[in-house]
Amino acid sequence: MGDEGGAVVNGVSHQAVVGGPATFGFGDTAGVLPGDQRTFDDVEAGIVALWRRFGEQREQRLRDRLVLHYAPLVKYVAGRVGTGLPAHVEVADLIQSGIFGLVDAIEKFEPERGLKFETYAMQRIRGAILDDLRAQDWVPRSVRGRAREVERALERLGAQLRRTPTDAELADELGLSLHELRDVYAQLQLTSVVALDELAAAGRGSTPLADILEDQEALDPVALLVDQDNRRQLAQAIAHLAERDRVVVTLYYFENLTLAEIGRVLGVTESRVCQLHTRAVLRLRAKLLEKTEA
């Protein structure tokens, strides 16, 4: 089962989560769409009946209807979890992970226990999102925990001393030696990775880093235009040379022949070719100067 243009997880489209018309908020009439004449009580009664049928039959089509009904929960939880995360973490990715948690919550929920499904599902959705984030984290959990310990110790000492604590004071607070504290610093370097775009964006708005970094391999557009114009002027100047001068220039500069080889081609001496070459160069230079001064 999948809607056109929506990604599918376990056969369930999550298009409604990303951009569907339903909204979620405590106290809202979740599930009642614009133009739908049913009351909130009607919807709730329908959901209770759907839960009962799903508990009896465990059919995927019934589970999918429950997923679509509760899909706004995923967007709500993903938005809450995403607050404070680095900018490169997309909320859409969190939603993808959260859908797995919602499906798992629906399949494991036991209505007869009297628990509210939304409360139970939000915990499962949040857990699925956090599990996926941890799986993508290259930093060991022990290092993350140590980083939090250091941060809390810095906050406590800062509040007590009303200044930034020294390494010796921080080590004493953590029960470590200075050498052990420096080892901790070395480990925590792994947790200090930031996106270059975020780092470079500080104080300069939202201009992407790619727009301000110089590409060392790129051609200078001004130099490229100047070179193209010089080539065009040179080609025009060569076209105005006498035929023999033009042949000498072409064979010498484009075919890489020596003056002696050009002499054999033209049937003249090497010294004569040298004279023709000098004359052609002088005429070209004069022609180019005329165009430059014009």
Image (cartoon, grey):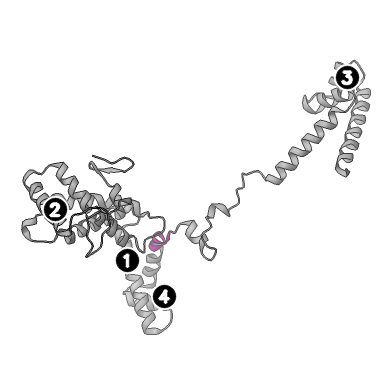
In three-dimensional space, the C-alpha distance between marks 1 and 3, rounded to whole angstroms, equals: 82 Å
Element type where label 3 sits in the image: helix
Q: Which residue is mark 2?
A: 47
Q: Which residue is mark 1?
A: 146
Q: Nearer the viewer, residue 267 or 6?
A: 6
User: Residue at left 11%, top 61%?
Assistant: 115
Residue bounds of the magenta highlight: 187-193
Element type where label 2 sits in the image: helix
Residue 18 screen position, x and y as percent:
32, 51
In three-dimensional space, the C-alpha distance between marks 2 and 3, rounded to whole angstroms, equals: 99 Å
**Res. 263 mark:** 3
In three-dimensional space, the C-alpha distance between marks 3 and 4, rounded to whole angstroms, equals: 82 Å
Quick check: can you spot residue 83? yes
Considering only vertical position in the picture, is 195 above or below 176? above
User: Residue at left 23%, top 53%?
Assistant: 36
Q: Earlier in the sequence, mark 1 or mark 3?
A: 1
Q: Earlier in the sequence, mark 3 or mark 4?
A: 4
